[in-house]
Image (spheres, coloured by chain):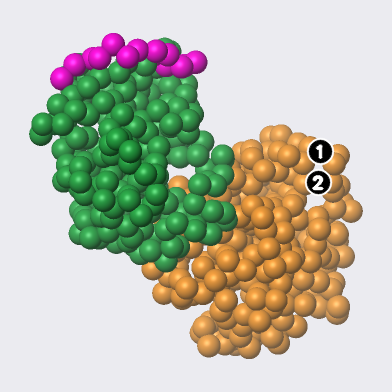
Chain colours: A orange, B green
Amino acid sequence: MAWNGKDGETEHALERGFTIEVDGHAVPGVYWQPKQGTGDYLVLLGHGGGTHKKVGYLLAMVELLAQRGIAALSIDGPGHGERVQQSRSQKISDFAQVWHQAGGTEAVINDWKAALDFVEAEQGARGTAWWGLSMGTMMGLPVTASDERIKLALFGLMGEWGPNQEDLVRLAPAVTCPVRFLVQWDDEVVPREACLALFNRLGSKTKTLHANPGRHAAVPRFEMAASIAYLHERLDKYPPGSA
Amino acid sequence: MAWNGKDGETEHALERGFTIEVDGHAVPGVYWQPKQGTGDYLVLLGHGGGTHKKVGYLLAMVELLAQRGIAALSIDGPGHGERVQQSRSQKISDFAQVWHQAGGTEAVINDWKAALDFVEAEQGARGTAWWGLSMGTMMGLPVTASDERIKLALFGLMGEWGPNQEDLVRLAPAVTCPVRFLVQWDDEVVPREACLALFNRLGSKTKTLHANPGRHAAVPRFEMAASIAYLHERLDKYPPGSA
């Protein structure tokens, strides 16, 4: 339950690794503190399937956040990154097995809660948002539905689909914070209709769907950048000290 | 074919009325020049059904545009505003009749082309965009498909539906400029599926759908404001003198 010394830095943020114990398993994570600004807000970054807590596009989001003075937190999801099981194949057919072997949605919720507990204890509580696409929404929707500390969310590239489809369907109405939801119109992984259905089911009164042409992993760069601006704009409604 | 002396002003723009003759009928319009800034760009504002060229929400867009130094142009659509026929009912059932009696889609294209010709002759050619929802898209999609001077468009609240459904379906693939397309998820006038289908059919490589909960006329204020920011950002790629 501590910083693990795996420190580093990006152009705009200082990076500190940590490892926490959750229900008997180790969860490795990273916390990024902006070099400029005060880190008055925190964004939880959920990575996509087959990637990890420091995958390139998450680091790009860390930079965009840090430039706005916003801190970030990421952990490896079940069976991903430093939690990959020996000889695990990356095949999509194994994805459900990996998800459920690690304890499924309930374990994911506990992992993230513990990570946020740790960072808040060390660095203070702040207005907090979720950002995660694809598996980042498989994790983030249940976490957001279960943790009142998360005030808004960027979801997307996920639908009523996949290993925890039943959990997503069950928990979507319990998400009531503002949400922006990204859809790739020609998504070859998660069917468009399944994505629209999940957006439809979210309990949030304020929710906006943004759809662009292209395949699953081809979210336009302007949409990625705009997603961070969206979080920042809404987090500004939670001034420091109000968390 | 001239300014008609119906001049006025808003907080941020000077307003000049004009009337042009198109194929034997009179088309009344308004041109707004920002008080500040140079009017380096022009936005064509298409009003919704049952309203007119100076309806309140268009005037709100005029203000947002003028604050950014962008000029605007609006005309009354067929059977609307000063073109209302005596004793015409406002019933939705008459809408198709009104549209077709005035010459239908083809006449709408000609009206707008003539209006833009007039304003360009008087005020100079500039980077130009379309903004129009509902009937503003019934007019704007065919106009944008037919007039190369229009470099990008804000459409929405319309689908493969209504009096000129066949024209919209036929012309949507000919729209190739960047488009933002607004959908109201609970639209009680134009079915959601019809809206998604029209978005799908647009020929534009760069197009983004924004969907929000709520009924036809309940587009969130933040989405209206963001639509003007979108046009401005994209028009900045057409520097003055390049039109």
Q: Is residue B105 visible?
A: no
Residue B78 location (% of width, % of height): 26, 39
- Image side of residue B203 versus residue A199, left or right: left
The one nearer the camera, A226 or A200, is: A200
A99 vs B167: above or below: below
Residue B224 location (% of width, % of height): 50, 39
Q: Is residue B169 visible?
A: yes
Check disc 2 and report the residue beneath it: A126
The one nearer the camera, B109 or A9, is: B109
Quadrant containing the N terminus of chain A in the rendered view: bottom right
Determine if marks 1 and 2 fall on one subunit: yes
> CA separation, marks 1 and 2?
6 Å
- Image side of residue B6 versus residue A97, left or right: left
A243 vs A162: above or below: above
Determine which of the numbered discs, if any, sits on residue A240 in the image: 1
Residue sticking out furthest to the left: B23
What element does badge 2 sit on?
loop
Kindly indicate whether the residue at mark 2 contacts the one at mark 1 (C-beta within 8 angstroms).
yes
What element does badge 1 sit on?
loop
Quarter of the view holding residue A202: bottom right
Magenta residues? B1-14
